[in-house]
Amino acid sequence: MKTTKKFQLSESEIPQRWYNIVADMPNRPKPLLNPQTREPLQPHEMEGLFAKDLVEQEFSAERWIDIPEEVINLYKIYRPTPLVRATALEKALDTPAKIFFKNESVSPVGSHKLNTALAQAYYNNKQGIKKLTTETGAGQWGSAMSIACQYFGIDLVVFMVKRSFEQKPYRKIVINSYGGQVHPSPTNLTEYGRKVLAQDPDCGGSLGMAISEAVEMAVTTPNTRYTLGSVLNHVLLHQTIIGLEAEKQMAMAGEYPDKVIACFGGGSNFSGISFPFLRHRLTDGTPTEFIAAEPAACPKLTRGKLEYDFGDTAGMTPLIPMYTLGHDFQPEQIHAAGLRYHGGGQLVSQLKADGYINSCAIEQEETFKAGLLFAKTEGIIPAPESTHAIAATIREALKAKENGKSEVILFNLSGHGLLDMGAYENYL
């Protein structure tokens, strides 16, 4: 293992504002639709589900939105996160490409999810909300929301995809340790969950089903709201702190990325690393390429259709214009549970349709091979989700080797895999 080079900012250099890419998009996405009327959704119609300030951010077209001081102070627990030059991986690949990664695994929950969890808990607390519901696939989002709710004295109920609940027992222990309640979805706690179990008692669940249960509980319980870890505009907004830091750090390294890569489930970590760099392409024509790395088992951007679809399986959420495999799609139970979501989200889907974003679908075996190479060279065992970004990076680095190009590649290491040892054991 070769010594790597880190580029670290000081606490005083943490960005003070999030970047809203809607302000610079040449084509604004089509509006969300009310699931009952099929008319454009109005902000007040979402306020029974989300905190009012989050709804305002969801519909905002302001380029910069101030980060509350309380959220910045909590960010300082783990931010700024380091940017690392992966010189050992470069050497192993014998590539002329320069590979950098933003290490979001250093947060208390081991992933990027805390960036928006803290913000969402803050805005709900500001409104006086006492209870939140949410879903989680692999458990990273549930873990992040659990600790965020503890900071602000909010009760949390998490619906975790049943197959992941069974495969990843330590994730539920993390959620419980932070004070959250976690249930394997589908459950008997909601009308929708009981309906699913009546039809299929052994159902392994999906993110769409878990969302349906969390939404149902939120809208039927007093003083309760719902939180989402990806897909929606306000969630992607909060994650742009990743790319805004990376911009400063790449400047410290004296480089600018030719390619920006991240794994893709609903779009939170991909948008977080890419949107701040994409704004330069939108406003100045900077020729950076943006690549979303998806699992071959759930390739919504690569093989889905661009159309209106529900964000959940039961059809309770607003209709979203996005690349989708269908809201009733149940993907293969791959280990990258956080990427098993059927749709691509409003903003990313529009940007892909306009040609600003590319995507690729990668088989699970290739991703774990890439993850182990990264572990052996850079010393970090990556989350199964993050191995997709690593695999796509390796593909691009080997292309650079074939073409004799000295490209600069930046990818987001969205989380570590220290609670995913069962997945690695199965692969090995």
Image (spheres, helix red, strand yellow):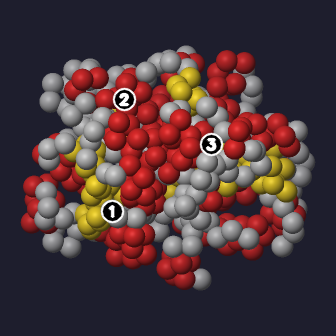
In terms of image quadrants, where is residue 356? top right
Crowding around mark 3 (Cα neighbors within 10 Å: few <14, some 14 to 19, many 20+) is many
**Image quadrant where one finds the C terminus:** bottom right
Query: SS of the residue at dot 3?
Result: helix
Q: Position of residue 116 (x, y in %)?
A: 47, 44
- The amino acid type, in three-letter code, at marker 3 is Ile
Is 180 or 337 nearer to us in this picture? 180
Crowding around mark 1 (Cα neighbors within 10 Å: few <14, some 14 to 19, many 20+) is many
Q: Position of residue 344 (x, y in %)?
A: 44, 41
Distance in Å between CA atoms under marks 2 and 3 = 22 Å
Residue hosting label 2: 53
Q: Position of residue 70 (x, y in %)?
A: 50, 40
Nearer to us of marks 2 and 3 is 2
**Sequence order check, earlier mark of 2 and 1:** 2
Query: SS of the residue at dot 1?
Result: loop
Q: Position of residue 145 (x, y in %)?
A: 40, 54
* Residue 180: mark: 1
Q: Is residue 196 visible?
A: no
**Sequence order check, earlier mark of 1 and 3:** 1
Tell me the residue at 79%/40% (across/down): 250
Residue hosting label 3: 242
Tell whether label 3 touches label 1 (CB within 8 Å). no
* Residue 266: mark: none
